[in-house]
Image: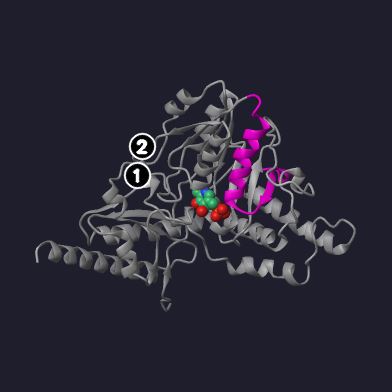
Amino acid sequence: MTLKIPIYLDNHSTTKVDPKVVEAMLPYFSENYGNAASRQHEFGWKAEAAVENARKQIARLVGAENPEIVFTSGGTESINLALKGVAEAYASKRNHIITATTEHKAVLDTCARLEEHGFEITYLPVDTAGLISVADLKNAITNKTILVTIMLANNEIGTIAPIAEIGAVCRGAGIFFHADATQATGKIPVNVVEMNVDLMSFSAHKMYGPKGVGALYVRANRPKVNLTALIDGGGHERGMRSGTLNVPAIVGFGKAAALAQENMSMEAKRVAAFRDELESGIASQLDEVMVNGNQAHRLPNNSNMTFKGVNADRLILDMKDIAVSSGSACSSASPEPSHVLRAIGLSDEDVLSSIRFGLGRFTTAEEIDYTINRVVQTVKAAREKSLQLAHP
Ligand code: PLP
């Protein structure tokens, strides 16, 4: 296969829309363009049927009942709806939320907003692997705690949290549990029942679907979660998220979920093998390379590496033929040194020397070989240059 430059290794930021997803979406722009809320004619019925089919595909991927899936504009909105929606609905009874320092900005900034409105937030620390301690969680729970929110997989280091265990603690304490599964869904098995979650956030564009669509899982029974809507209007999505549904995007999301379900285990093995090859290929030729995070429980497509003494932003500029990211480009419109790498104990210098590689469905063996060579050469050149500058 001929190598196409630039190579895309930034799949945590977003993914290419799978051609099968594009194909599934197209008729909903041009032929079946009805409003899914139009109950009186065939255009509306077709759109509604397509939305319900997509809802079923997503529910099946995560082990939910169809009505428990609420469509939103993406992961950020789902998280806002989960956190603010629960906070407001139960504010008269409880006002305390527990989260972790390594969460995505969508969670941290939502918590900060709730703090401004009088809620108390506990930010649990993590260990060097990026995991909270369940004992810390238990200690943080008070009779005012209404919600715990912990991500299933981290967007920078890929660490997978023991969500079922955390969920069991919350269930035992009568506290709602939200998990941000934006990075994990479609890559590793997700089951809302086995994971003991009450709310879970998803985003289509992280799993080969279109941008601008996502979903929130809202448990309907044992316990039923009540949410105050963020967006009021025509009462769509059972009153939890008003606004005309984006039918083509929802159809694409459904198709992406079905494809993920079909291919997940094979794809995870293939992608993890490429990732391991990337890491060993680089580490065998370079000194002072560190792999960050939890190597035992990590997303198959994630690799976060520190190249000691080398500025990651400079490195990325010198390798324009490879799309990767430093810090947390996907989580913020104004990137700043990664709060996640800091939280797992990296020094500021090491944080600024770290790069995230995000492999994906379309990554090839040739791309991995090319990337290994390119990274090795570029890091060596950068280190030689800084040696010359230090000892002219
Ligand atoms: N949560 C995590 C872990 C993410 O990686 C992202 C991506 O930026 C989001 C939430 C936000 O998702 P979206 O881009 O769909 O709003």
The residue shown at (84%, 64%) is: 43
From the top left corner, tell me how far across and down residue 14 is, in percent: 51, 60
* SS at badge 2: loop
Residue range in magenta is 64-93
Say if residue 258 shows up in the picture: yes
Q: Separation of disc 1 and disc 2 at Cα?
A: 11 Å
- Whether 187 is among the magenta residues is no
Q: Nearer the viewer, residue 363 or 73?
A: 73
> Label 1 sits on what residue type?
Arg
Magenta span contains residue 68: yes
Residue situated in front as seen by the camera: 131 or 63 = 131
Please state the total of marks drawn on the protein image.
Answer: 2
Kindly report which numbered mark, 1 or 2, lies closer to the viewer in this rendering.
Answer: 1
The kind of residue on which mark 2 rests is Asp
| Residue 184 visible in the current orientation | no
Residue depicted at x 57% and y 66%: 18
Q: Secondary structure at mark 1?
A: helix
Mark 1 lies on residue: 342
**Which residue is identified by label 2?**
127
Task: Estimate how packed mark 2 is, as few (under 14), some (14 to 19) or many (20 or more) residues with alpha carbons within 10 Å.
Answer: few
Q: Is residue 74 left or right of residue 287?
A: right
Q: Nearer the viewer, residue 106 or 130?
A: 106
Asked where in the image residue 173 lies, by quadrant, the reply is top right
Name of the residue lying farthest toward the top: 143
Dot 1, how many residues are within 10 Å of its Cα: few (below 14), some (14-19), or many (20+)? some
Q: In terms of sequence position, does the residue under pointer 1 or pointer 2 come before the other?
A: 2
Q: Quadrant of the C terminus?
A: bottom left
In the displayed structure, 219 sits above or below 104; it is above
- Which residue is the extreme one toward the left? 391
Q: Residue furthest bottom?
A: 2
